[in-house]
Image (tube, rainbow, N blue to C red):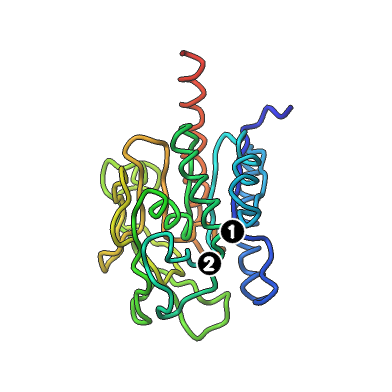
């Protein structure tokens, strides 16, 4: 039995044969999360949500913390939207439902959770929120018409003072690497906005009570500011330590 804390890194799917370039870049990003976590003492398990809710909940059931990483658009049926919007990606509704279920289980059990990009949107939708389906090609949150490794762009976000995010990254402005064409619209229940971009779009959310933080950007990108992913994973470690201490004292 490992004495290291266990971390479940959860992606929508492991295979994207229809788009090899996108597949390769996602593998790089997910691999960066795993490598960084392992370098700081986490025992990491990589899980794919497209196996379904039961399989995901079972596989992640013993994890001490969870990271939900980026990927495809969430099917709009989960938040009362319609298909046919601009820049729509393919959808993986089985994975969507599984990750939504995982967020609910994590909150109920107070398992520390970090959401990244799609992971933030999954958190919001899981708690009844909705999404802006497309920000428009001029919004400055993703580069269009370039090779996949160049789709990420750099912009600043402004963390809210006194937020958990500000405690980890400072009160900003904080430069981030971004590649999203959707954003939070209506905010989910018990969530608070803890960072916005220059144009007012939501860039980070936290739960009012549960140990949950999600960011709309990619701290795991190779061009992200040094130490950003490390700090966010350290936040998970701190939440895990607090949960362990509280359980021992009970």
Q: Residue at x 45, y 34 (%)?
A: 108
In the rendered image, which quarter is residue 13 located in?
Answer: bottom right
> Which residue is at 70% across, 73% downward?
17
61, above or below 31, in the image: above
Q: Which mark is residue 207?
A: none
SS of the residue at dot 2? loop
Q: Residue pushed farthest top? A: 249
**Dot 1 lies on which element?**
loop
Of 188 and 146, nearer the camera is 188
Which is more N-terminal, label 2 or label 1?
1
The label number, if any, that marks residue 72 in the structure image: 2
Hey, which residue is sitting farthest bottom in the picture? 145
Can the viewer see residue 78 in this picture? Answer: yes
173 up-or-down from 58: above or below: below
- Across and down, in percent, residue 61 comes to 60, 36
Front one among 134 and 180:
134
Q: Nearer the viewer, residue 169 or 46?
A: 46
Q: Which mark is residue 12?
A: 1
Q: Residue at x 61, y 44 (%)?
A: 8
Q: Is residue 225 visible?
A: no
Task: Give coordinates of residue 168: x percent, y percent.
Answer: 40, 43
Percent x, y of residue 3? 68, 27
Question: Looking at the rendering, in which quadrant would you find the N terminus?
Answer: top right
Q: Position of residue 250 (x, y in %)?
A: 46, 13
Q: Is the residue 126 above or below the residue 152 in the image?
A: above
**Residue 65 figure quarter:** top right
């Amino acid at each position: 039995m490992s004495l290291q804390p266990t971390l479940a890194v959860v992606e929508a799917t492991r295979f994207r044969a229809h788009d090899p370039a996108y597949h390769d870049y996602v593998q790089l990003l997910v691999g960066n999360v795993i490598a960084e976590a392992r370098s700081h003492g986490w025992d990491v398990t990589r899980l794919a949500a497209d196996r379904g809710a039961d399989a995901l909940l079972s596989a992640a059931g013993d994890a001490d913390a969870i990271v939900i990483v980026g990927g495809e658009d969430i099917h709009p049926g989960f938040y009362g939207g319609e298909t046919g919007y601009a820049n729509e990606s393919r959808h993986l509704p089985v994975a969507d439902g599984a990750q939504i279920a995982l967020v609910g289980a994590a909150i109920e059990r107070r398992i520390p959770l970090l959401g990244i990009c799609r992971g933030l949107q999954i958190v919001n939708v899981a708690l009844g929120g909705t999404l802006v389906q497309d920000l428009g090609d001029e919004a400055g949150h993703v580069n269009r018409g370039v090779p996949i490794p160049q789709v990420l762009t750099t912009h600043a976000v402004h963390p809210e003072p006194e937020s958990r995010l500000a405690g980890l990254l400072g009160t900003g402005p904080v430069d981030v690497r971004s590649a999203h064409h959707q954003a939070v619209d209506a905010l989910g229940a018990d969530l608070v906005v803890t960072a916005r971009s220059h144009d007012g779009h939501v860039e980070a959310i936290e739960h009012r009570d549960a140990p949950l933080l999600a960011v709309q950007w990619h701290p795991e990108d190779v061009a992200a500011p040094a130490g950003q992913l490390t700090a966010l994973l350290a936040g998970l470690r701190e939440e895990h330590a607090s949960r362990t201490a509280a359980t021992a004292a009970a």
